[in-house]
Image (cartoon, helix red, strand yellow):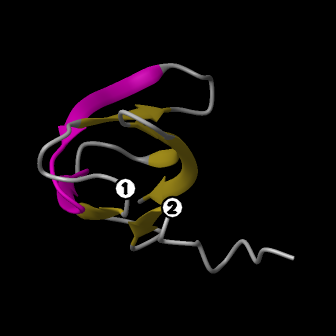
């Protein structure tokens, strides 16, 4: 049985810290510098509140302007990852 608290980084996405405050680190194992990935933040009503591009495996995003519970969707050339994050 796959344990939710231990994401499989070989094919997954990790957002930390959770809850986040000023910055959010996005670790995407299948993202690389040659291919862009799109990251989108959706609020609890399903409204997209932010969109951006990821480059490479590790990106640090400024999330100081956001507050609440968000669904984060990362799409790259081959995969889609969905995670939930709290931003205080």
Q: Is residue 68 above or below residue 9?
A: above
Q: Quadrant of the C terminus?
A: bottom left
Q: Quadrant of residue 21?
A: bottom left
Q: Is residue 65 left or right of residue 72?
A: left
According to the picture, the residue beneath numbered tag 2 turns out to be 11
Find the magenta span and give its range: 48-63
* Residue visible at 45% across and 66% down in the picture: 14
Q: Quadrant of the N terminus?
A: bottom right
Report the residue that reaches farthest toward the top: 47
User: What kind of element bears circle 1?
Assistant: loop
How many numbered marks appear?
Answer: 2
Q: Main secondary structure of the magenta part?
A: strand
For the residues labelled 2 and 1, say whether their Cβ atoms are less than 8 Å apart.
yes
- Mark toward the start of the polypeptide (2 vs 1): 2
According to the picture, the residue beneath numbered tag 1 turns out to be 30
Q: Quadrant of residue 48?
A: top left
Classed neighbour count for the residue bearing mark 1: other residues with Cα under 10 Å, few (<14), some (14–19), many (≥20): some
Q: Is residue 38 above or below residue 57?
A: above
Q: Nearer the viewer, residue 86 or 71?
A: 71
* Residue visible at 20% across and 39% down in the picture: 35
User: What kind of element bears circle 2?
Assistant: loop
Q: Is residue 51 magenta?
A: yes
- Residue 52 at what x, y percent from top left? 22, 33
């Amino acid at each position: 049985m796959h344990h939710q608290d231990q994401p499989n980084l070989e094919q997954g996405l990790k957002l930390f810290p959770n809850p986040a405050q000023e910055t959010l680190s996005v670790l995407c194992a299948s993202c690389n510098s040659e291919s862009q990935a799109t990251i989108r933040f959706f609020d609890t009503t399903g409204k997209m509140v932010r969109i951006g591009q990821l480059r490479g495996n590790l990106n640090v995003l400024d999330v100081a302007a956001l507050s609440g519970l968000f669904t984060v969707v990362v799409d790259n050339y081959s995969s889609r990852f969905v995670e939930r994050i709290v931003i205080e």
